[in-house]
Amino acid sequence: MESTRSNFIWDAIEEDLKEGHYSEVHTRFPPEPNGYMHIGHCKALIMDFLTAEKYGGKCNLRFDDTNPAKEDTEYVEAIKRDIHWLGFDWTGGLYYASDYYDKCYEIAEDWIMRGLAYVDELSKDEMREYRGTLTEPGRNSPWRDRPAEESLDLFRRMRNGEFPEGSKTLRAKIDMSSPNIVMRDPAIYRILYKEHWRTGNKWCIYPMYDFAHPIGDALEGVTHSLCSLEYEIHRPLYDWVVEKASNLLPGHPRQIEFARLNLTQTVMSKRYLRQLVEGGYVKGWDDPRMPTLSAMRRRGYTPEAIRSFVDQIGMSKADSTVDFAFLEHCVRDDLGSRAPRVMAVLKPLKVILTNWPEDKKQTITLENHPDHPEFGTRNITFSREIYVEQDDFMENPPKKYFRLYPGNEVRLKGAYIIRCDECVKNDQGEVIELHCTVDLESASGTPGADRKVKGTLHWVSADDCVPFEARLYEPLLSEEMPDEEAAEDEGYGASAKKDFISRLNPDSITVLNGFAEPCTALADNGTTYQFLRNGYFCKDPDSTPEKPVFNRTVGLKDTWAKISK
C-alpha cells in the first residue's frame, strides 16, 4: 500500500526538487545491529522506503555498526527479514558504516592538519564538566590548542593501540561557547579494544555516530536523511561535518526530523528489551509479548496492518503517544476480511445431549467467512457430547443473561437449539458437566430454525475436536514508563533498571488448554483464524501434530472504535 496522505516531509522534498537542489530522491534506513527492530522503528523505516518509492528514487539499507560491543550478525539478518516482511527492499544497495572506516579516518587526519580536530586527554567526567550547561558556556580543554603535528602523531598512535581505553579521544574543534551543547567540541573518535564483527581487529579506534553517519550519507549519494525528532539538535553538527569534509565527499544531504512513534504500555528501548531477553523475563526476541516485529509476526500481526497504522497516525513534528488500542484496531480491521472463521473453546465445559442417540453423528456444513463465499465451506461433526465455554454457563444468572442456565435455551452455532436441564458438580461444588435436551426440529436450514432464542454459542464436538494450547497476552508493562526512562540513554543506573522491572505486568501471559475444530491441527504455522467470539488466533511454531499452539493476536472487542466516537 502507498499512502496518499501528504506530510511536511514530502512537501519539503517537493520544494527541493522544484528549486533544483536535487534531481532525484535518495533515502536510507540506518538501523543499529544491536537488537531486533520493534514497532517504534516502523515509522522511520516506512517513511524512508515509502518516500523513495513515491518519488521513483532509491533507498539504501545501511547498518550503523559503529559500536562493536553490542553488534551481531543475528540482528543484521533479523532486520533484513523484517524489512522484506513489511514489503520493502533496499533498492539503493546494502551498506555498513564500517565500509567507510578508512574514509572516516582519512577525513579525521585531514581535519587535524586543517586545525578542525585535536586529540584530547580529558577523562569522561572532566569532559562533561568542561562542556558547561544549558545556561553556562563550556571551557576549552587544556589540549585544545596543541599543535596539529602533535595531535596527528597521537591520533596515529591511538590507532596503533598505544593508549588505554578512555585515555584519549579525538574531538572536533567547533565552539565551546555555542548555545547548542552538541556543538561544543564533540568527540568524533574513541579508543575501544573490541573485535568488530566485520573488520575483526583491524581497528581499535572507532568513529562516533554523529561523525560517521553524515559521512556515510554523503558517500552513498543520499539526498534526504530522515530521522526522528531527538536528532534535531544534532542537525547543525550533521551539516558541519558534511561541509568541513566536502573536499573529500561527493554530496550534501539534507536532514529532516519527525516525531518518533511512542505507544502506551510498550517498551521502546532496545536496551530494556535486551534486558528482558537476557534476564529471562521473556522467551526471546520473538516472544509474542515483545514489541519487536518478529514477535508481532509470530503473534499474527500482518504487515498491511502495521503499514496502515503508521499511515493513519501520520507524520508530525510534535511528540505524542499513541494508544496501543489503535494499533490493535488496525490489526483487527485487517484480519476481519482475511481470517477464516472456526470454533474453538478456550475453557471447556462438557455438555451431554441426553436425547441425542449415542451412535448418531451428523455432518454440519459451515461457511469459512460470512462476507467471502470464495473462502468456501467446511464440515464439522455434531454428536451427543460437545464442549462449550465455561463462561457461557451460570447456575444463578443475573438479569439479561442470555446464555446457558437451568431451564434456558440457546442455539448452537450452525446447529440446534438446546435447553439446559441439569448441571453436575464435583465434590468441591464446581460445575463439571451439563445435561441438555436438543430441539430436534430446530436444525439450522430447516423450518424449525425459524424459532428465535436470544443466545447463540460456539461449540466443538467431543468426537473429533483437537486439544490445543491458547496463549493470551496482555501488555508487558502494568504502568507507563516515564519519558526519561523510555529514552535510549546509557546513563541510567541500577535503580532505574530496578524500577523498570518492577513495572512489568505479572499477568502478561495466560495459558489455557482448550479444544478446537480438527482443521486447526492441519493448518500451517502462522495461519490466523478468527475463533468465533474469542478473537483472532495465530498458530505458533511451538505447535506439534498432537497439540497445536495458538497465540491470541487480538480480541474481537474494538475499544479504539469506542474511544474514537
Image: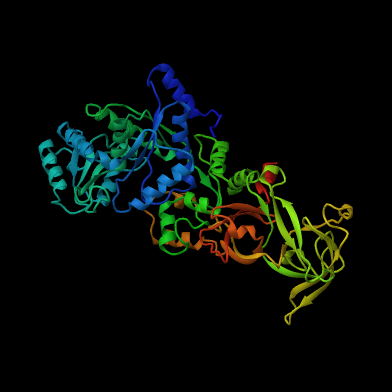
Quadrant position of residue 231: top left
Q: Can residue 473 be seen in this view?
A: no
Frontmost residue, 155 versus 406: 406
Please tell me which residue lies in front, 344 or 325: 344
Viewport quadrant of the C terminus:
top right
- Pinpoint residue 472: horizontal percent, then vertical percent: 60, 60
Colour convention: rainbow
Horizontal side of 186 relative to 450 (left or right) equals left
Q: Nearer the viewer, residue 422 or 138?
A: 422
Q: Is residue 385 left or right of residue 185?
A: right
Above or below for 21 versus 275: above
Report the quarter where the N terminus lies: top right
Give the quadrant of residue 418: bottom right
Location of residue 257 with respect to 127 vertically, above or below: above
Q: In this view, does 537 lie above or below 251?
A: below
How far across and how far down the image is residue 405, in percent?
Answer: 82, 67
